[in-house]
Image (spheres, rainbow, N blue to C red):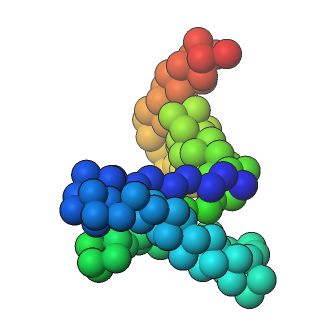
């Protein structure tokens, strides 16, 4: 899990009260604590507001393992492997030898590209 908090402190609320950042962090901590008690598996994201109600940042908690898995599944290599699976299915259903040849040629190119990535 990764918790990220961003606060932009370039406004009047921070000039007027040196403890404004601390107040905002306490509010964020209370909301995070409540979230973790109620739904610890779900991602968490909130906007952070200063005492005047202005949005000055955000806080988010993400499952980095899930985020990495999504990134890997959407990687160029994963997309090439998915394309190979699709072409393999198409090859099984090809109607003509010419169509089979075209599919096999594309599959060969993808395999070459994959081998270069290894």
Q: Is residue 66 visible?
A: no
Residue 2 visible in the displayed image:
yes
The residue positioned 70% from the left and 76% from the top of the image is: 33
Q: Is residue 7 left or right of residue 54?
A: right
Q: Position of residue 80 (x, y in %)?
A: 54, 36
Residue visible at 34% across and 71% down in the picture: 50
| Residue 37, placed above or below residue 111 | below
37 horizontally vs 30: left or right? right
Say if 33 sits above or below 6 in the image: below
Picture quarter with the N terminus? bottom right
Residue 29 in the image, given as x and y percentages of width and height:
62, 71
Residue 69 at x, y = what percent? Answer: 67, 49
Q: Quadrant of residue 30?
A: bottom right
The image shows residue 113 at horizontal and vertical percentages of 53, 19
Check the image and report above or below for 76 versus 39.
above
Which of the two residues, 6 or 89, is positioned nearer the viewer here?
6
């Amino acid at each position: 899990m990764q918790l990220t908090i961003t606060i932009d402190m370039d406004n009047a609320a921070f000039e007027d009260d040196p403890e404004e950042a601390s107040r905002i962090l306490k509010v964020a901590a209370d909301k995070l604590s409540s979230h973790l008690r109620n739904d610890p598996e779900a991602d968490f994201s909130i906007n952070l507001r200063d005492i005047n109600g202005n949005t000055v940042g955000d806080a988010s908690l993400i499952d980095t393992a899930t985020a990495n898995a999504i990134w890997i599944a959407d990687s160029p290599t994963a997309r090439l492997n998915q394309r190979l699976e699709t072409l393999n299915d198409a090859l099984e259903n090809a109607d003509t030898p010419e169509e089979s040849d075209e599919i096999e040629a594309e599959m060969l190119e993808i395999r070459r590209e994959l081998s270069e990535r290894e």
